[in-house]
């Protein structure tokens, strides 16, 4: 994950809740969502 998301990648509680919410996801979707959330949060 740090290879795709960078050294600041962390599994925080809200992100882990989203990952384990019962909807199927692949690693690409997880990486894309993490990057989107971090980009949106920095604006």
Image (cartoon, helix red, strand yellow):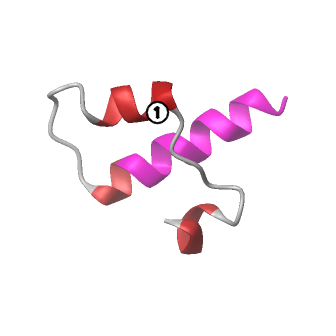
The quarter of the rendered structure image containing the C terminus is top right
Residue 20 position, x and y percent, is 25, 33
Mark 1 crowdedness (10 Å alpha carbons): few <14, some 14-19, many ≥20: some
Q: Nearer the viewer, residue 17 or 27?
A: 17
Q: Is residue 23 magenta?
A: no
Left or right, residue 25 beside residue 32: left
Left or right, residue 14 beside residue 37: left
Q: Is residue 42 magenta?
A: yes
Q: Nearer the viewer, residue 36 or 15?
A: 15
Q: Which residue appears at 14% of the width and 28% of the height?
A: 22
Residue that lies at the very extreme toward the right in this rendered image = 43
Residue 40 position, x and y percent, is 71, 30
Task: Please count the marks in the image.
Answer: 1
Residue 18 position, x and y percent, is 35, 28
Above or below, comparing residue 41 to residue 1 in the picture: above
The kind of secondary structure element at disc 1 is helix
Provide the major secondary structure of the magenta segment. helix
Q: Which residue appears at 54% of the width and 36% of the height?
A: 12
Q: Which residue appears at 59% of the width and 39% of the height?
A: 36
Residue 19 position, x and y percent, is 31, 36
Q: Quadrant of residue 37?
A: top right
Q: Pointer 1: what residue?
A: 15
Residue that lies at the very extreme toward the bottom in this rendered image = 3
Q: Which residue appears at 82% of the width and 33% of the height?
A: 42
Q: Magenta region: which residues?
A: 30-43
């Amino acid at each position: 994950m740090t290879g795709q998301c960078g050294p600041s990648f962390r599994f925080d509680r809200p992100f882990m809740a989203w990952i384990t919410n019962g909807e199927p996801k692949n690693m690409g979707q997880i990486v894309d969502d993490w990057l989107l959330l971090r980009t949106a949060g920095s604006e």
